[in-house]
Amino acid sequence: MGAGREVPISLDGVRDKNLMQLKKLNTALFPVRYNDKYYADALASADFTKLAYYSDICVGAIACRLEKKEGGAVRVYIMTLGVLAPYRGLGIGTMLLNHAIDLCSKQNIGEIYLHVQTNNEDAINFYKKFGFEITETIHNYYINITPPDCYVVTKLIDQPQPKK
């Protein structure tokens, strides 16, 4: 990179026409294969699922699912968040996660959470920087990967209080 040269990072929504980009990223990033329901949920989450581009190259993504809790409240589950290794450390993952957190705040969604493999210290530390906390340990969550255990990592999002 030339000194002082800003490379634009941009986010774009996932649609039918670029869904293959998400599939290719997931194959490169994650040790599991995702089924059709994953991709249907990603598309259904609308603005919560984004592709990240670095200088017009697709290098990362966040894919979320909206879930209804008892009582009707909605929470967001981060199914996947990943950035290709050569592009890590450039703020792309931060931009993707902040996008989802900001959207939760704007839509009055009070909780966002995900599962993280217990040995993935980089991911655990990344999410902790954004105020996520380990709220549960699930044994034997993953099949065919070691260790099979995961943490549930959750962030409660402050909601703007209505003016009285």
Image (cartoon, grey):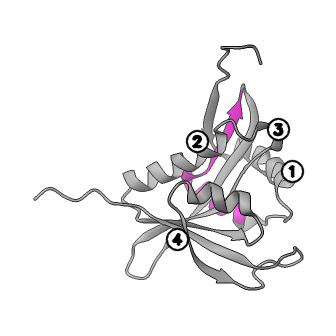
Picture disc at residue 95: 2
Q: Residues within 10 Å of mark 3 (few under 14, many from 20)?
A: few
Residue 43 lies in magenta, yes or no?
yes
Q: Is residue 125 above or below residue 115?
A: above
Identify the disc placed on residue 86.
3
Q: Nearer the viewer, mark 1 or mark 2?
A: 2
| Mark in front: 3 vs 1 | 3
Q: Which residue is mark 1?
A: 28
Between the residue at mark 4 and the residue at mark 1, the CA separation in whole angstroms equals: 27 Å
Give the residue type at disc 2: Met
Tell me which segment is drawn in magenta.
38-54
- The residue located at (64%, 30%) in the rendering is 9
Q: Who comes first in sequence, dot 3 or dot 2?
A: 3
Q: Is residue 27 above or below residue 21?
A: below
Quadrant containing the N terminus in the rendered view? top right
Q: Using the numbered discs, state the Cα–Cα distance from disc 3 to disc 4 in whole angstroms.
A: 33 Å
- Give 132 or 162, whichever is nearer the viewer: 132
Labelled disc at residue 67: 4
